[in-house]
Amino acid sequence: MKKSFQIGGAFVGLVVGGGFASGQEIMQFFTGFGIYGIMGAIIALFGFAFLGMNIAQLGYELHTKSHKAVVYHIAGRSLGAILDILITFFLFAVTVAMFAGAGAAFYQILGIDPIVGSLFMVIITVLTLMLNVKDIINVISVATPYLLAVMLIIAIYSIFTMDLSLAEQNILAQHQRVAAPNWLMGALLYVSYNIATSVAMMTVIGSTANSRRVAGFGGIIGGVMLGILIILINVAMLAKMDIVAGKDMPILEIASNMHPIIGLIMAIALIGMIYNTAVGLLYSFIIRFTPPKDPNYKAIVIMVGAIGFMASFVGFTTLVGQVYSLMGYLGFAIIIAIIISWINKR
């Protein structure tokens, strides 16, 4: 059971930075559709639980060290090769988004130049990747309970201190930028792009389980926790739409309005979430080409980190709106392949 919760916590840790950290992601895929976004969040909960279970179990069965073996296994050689290339590319693209997100967070929290914040995130990510894989998994999973507690407090506060009526907040929400044509597609795209980024590291995490059942249960636990987080963040932002509208980091804006200390706690959580995801994705990207035991591994980590830092100058909000939507459509192919594999086993 302890191992299942560790796997679940690591699953959440992988997704939160790219899917939750700023609130910008939830805004564009859920809250921007108003009340319907809550229905989308419920669909996302079931999607994450089902897919997390299957990916972790595949990782355990194949004992793979990268996503390549899994995509070839579930999609065949031809489609698997295409998915392998696309997943690898997007692993790097979302890592870049995390570096840019760190820059935006430091600017909003402390007024520090975004370049400095991005550079800090690159440095600590690169240093973490010098550890072994078990230490990396522990790092990714440790912050999940802390994050759940902070988000629960923020959601409760937002509901009980709502300044406008729900109908008024709902109207404001529907004027925000969205990354999908409707709420259902928003939910599906959100699950899809997060699966596309997390499938690589989740297979590695699943391979560390001591049984198929433990791996699968860990995936379910992680999926349920992700769904709860989506609902909490969605409700919090919908209740405070008059405050968060147009903000790069809406969750941080709510926390700062509660109290400066809460804002600081949320800022630490935010940076921790971005860090978790950056570590998991950059590690997944690099081990696709170079195993950790390779003598060139550390030099490659530093080189790729430097390239990612330079690419992060594009900007966080721009990357969320463009890269994430494209990843969502890629993820559909992965999800379909996973479902077909699940059906074939039965």
Image (cartoon, helix red, strand yellow):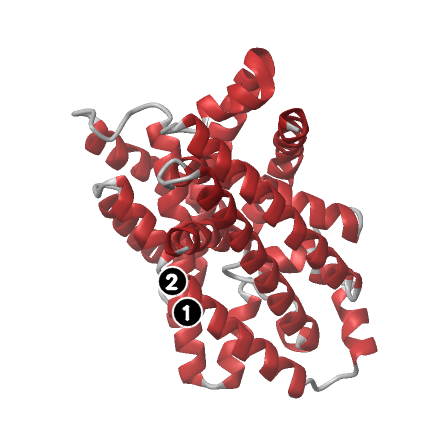
- Where in the figure is residue 272, as x and y percent of width and height? 37, 60
Give the quadrant of the C terminus: top right
Circles 1, 2 touching at the beta carbon (< 8 Å): yes
The local secondary structure at tag 1 comes to: helix
Circle 1 crowding by C-alpha within 10 Å: few under 14, some 14–19, many from 20: few
Q: Nearer the viewer, residue 230 or 327?
A: 230
Quarter of the view holding residue 86: top right
| SS of the residue under disc 2 | loop
Instruction: Answer with the quarter of the image where residue 61 lies.
Output: top left
* Residue 180 visible in the current orientation: no
Q: In which quarter of the image is the N terminus?
A: bottom left
Residue 143 badge: 2
Residues at marks 1 and 2, CA–CA distance in whole angstroms: 5 Å
State the count of labels. 2
- Asked if one can make out residue 28 in the rendered structure from this viewpoint, the answer is yes
- The residue at the point 54 percent across, 60 percent down is 225
Q: How crowded is mark 2: few (under 14 residues within 10 Å), some or many (20 or more)?
A: some
Left or right of 91 in this view: 38 = right
- Most extreme residue toward the top, as rendered? 78
**Residue closer to the observer: 128 or 163:** 128
Q: Name the residue under label 1.
A: 146
Vertical position of residue 10 compared to residue 55: above or below = below
Q: Which residue is drawn at 76% across and 45% down?
A: 185
Residue 92 at what x, y percent from top left?
44, 35
Q: Which amino acid does label 2 sit on?
A: Ala
Left or right of 270? Residue 241 is right
Seen at 66% across and 77% down, the residue is 240
